[in-house]
Every structure is written in C-alpha cells, then in structure tokens.
Image: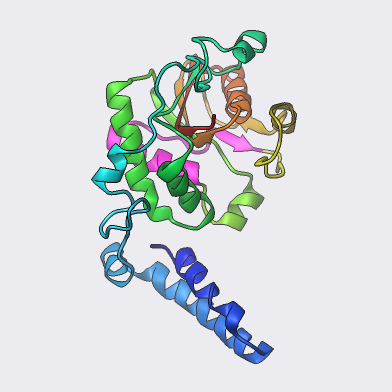
Amino acid sequence: MEGDSVVLILSKYRRTLKGNMIADMFDRGAVAARRIVRQLPGTALDLLFPLNCLGCQREGKILCASCVDSLPELKPPFCRVCAQPNAPATCHRCLESPPAFDGIRAPYEMEGTVKEAIHNMKYRGLKAAAPELAELLANYLEEHPMPGDVLTPVPLHPRRLRSRGYNQSALLAKELSKKLGLEMNQSLLIRAKNNQPQVSASRDERRENVQGSFRCDGRADGRTVILVDDVATTGSTLSACAAVLKAAGASSVWCLVLARES
C-alpha cells in the first residue's frame, strides 16, 4: 500500500465534511498521512494495510494463487504480429499497415481481475502490485522466450509523470529486470509530446496522436529491445516507439505487455 492509495481512501470521507475549515483540516491531515506512510518500510505497511486479493479479497497478496490460475489467458487464435485476439496468424490490419515492432506478446486478455489489477496500479496508486504483475510476465517469458538484451519501458511525458507520480510501465520493467537479470534502460526512450489521454480514441486517432511523440536519447545500435508496457490497445504507441528505436539502430523490437485489449 502506497501513500497515494492511503490518501485515496481518506478522500472518500472528505465528501461528508461540511464547512471549509473542517475540510481544510482534513486536507492537511491527508497530506501528513501521505508523508508518514511513504517513509514506512514495506513490512510496517503490510501490518497497517494488509494486502487483499483483487479477485477474491483473500488477505495476503494482490492476486492469490487461485485467482492467478483463473486469469483470462490470451490463447490462439491471435495475430502473431500485434496479438489481436480471435484473429488469423497475421491480421488484416498488420497486412495492410505493418507495424514497426517485430511482435507483441501478452499473457492475458484485458478483462476481469487482470484488468482490475492494471487499473489499480495505473490509476489508483497501487504500486505494490508491480512485483506480482512482473512475476506473471517473468513466468510467461520462461515458457514463451523472446529475443532481447535490454528492457525499455514505454515512457510518460514529464508533465504526466509529475501528475501521476510514477510510470507504471517503468515499475513493471524494473521488477522484471530484477527477476530476469536483464538490463533495464529507462532513458533509451523519451516522450517528447504530451498527448491527451487516448482511452476513447479510435485506432486512426491513436496512430495520428502518437506521431512524433517519442525520441531515442540513448545508444540503440545493434540492441535487441524488449519494450515493456502494461496493456496494448491498438499497438499504435508501441509501433511509434519501435519506429524510433529502429531508426536509432535497434536490430529488433519486441513488445511485452501484461494484457491485450480485444
């Protein structure tokens, strides 16, 4: 449990407060709580705020073993290029407009408990989910290896990073790097353009929005890159990142995401 999550819990009660003075006192208390909680070690946080499974509410982990076993796996048929579910080996979109990446791989479809876990990590401050979710990625790579000598997370624009406080893709890549013993280079890709959120954007809008959004600030010559993100929707962002990396000399760019949207 992180400080941001604590404040999120506390803020639910603010709506019941009447009067600016009381609300202001509550806000100051929430800020203090955030500072205190962020200084506590993980073991103390576990005692104060025990982790509960997002699937069944069982205490102990973000995802218990039983719920992990029931997560919606991405199974054939799916496109071997963009991982589009229920598609031929190469879907018509990849045939018509081949993406810059060599392929997307994902252990799960974006639904149910895995969707809840990603949203909690991404939007609700549950950074504690990253080690467990990275473990799922590591287990997937053991059974489905892909070429790669460096892990690179899809970057956030500095303004978005300041607003959110962290990059969920970087959290996954960092934990995955520890588990695989593989280099992580967070500065290889830079997001130069602060795009609007693309949750409701169409495929064509997403492709247009990400044009010119990224640049490569590191040495990519001859590198085999594994690009890490939490979810793939249309693949437009991943393709834009891969194009920049290959233009900088990367020999291949494979994309690893936790879940694929249908």
Answer yes or no: is residue 3 visible: yes
Q: Residue at x 57, y 33 (%)?
A: 189
Front-lying residue, 186 or 106 = 106
Percent across and percent down for residue 192 are 68, 38
Is 244 positioned to the left or the right of 135 in the image?
right
Dividing the picture into quadrants, the one containing residue 148 is: top left
Eyeballing the image, is 31 above or below 132? below
Q: Residue at x 32, y 53 (%)?
A: 56
Q: Can you give x and y, in whole percent of width and height, for residue 156 in the image?
A: 59, 43
Image side of residue 2 versus residue 48, left or right: right
Front residue (pair 15, 128): 15
Looking at the picture, tell me which residue is in the foreground, 188 or 213: 213
Residue 160 drawn at (x, y percent): 63, 50
User: What is the quadrant of residue 204 in the picture?
Assistant: top right
Q: Quadrant of the C terminus?
A: top right
188 in the magenta segment: yes
**Magenta-colored stretch includes residue 71:** no
Residue visible at 69% across and 28% down in the picture: 203
Q: Is residue 25 above or below residue 236?
A: below
Q: Which residues are magenta?
A: 168-191
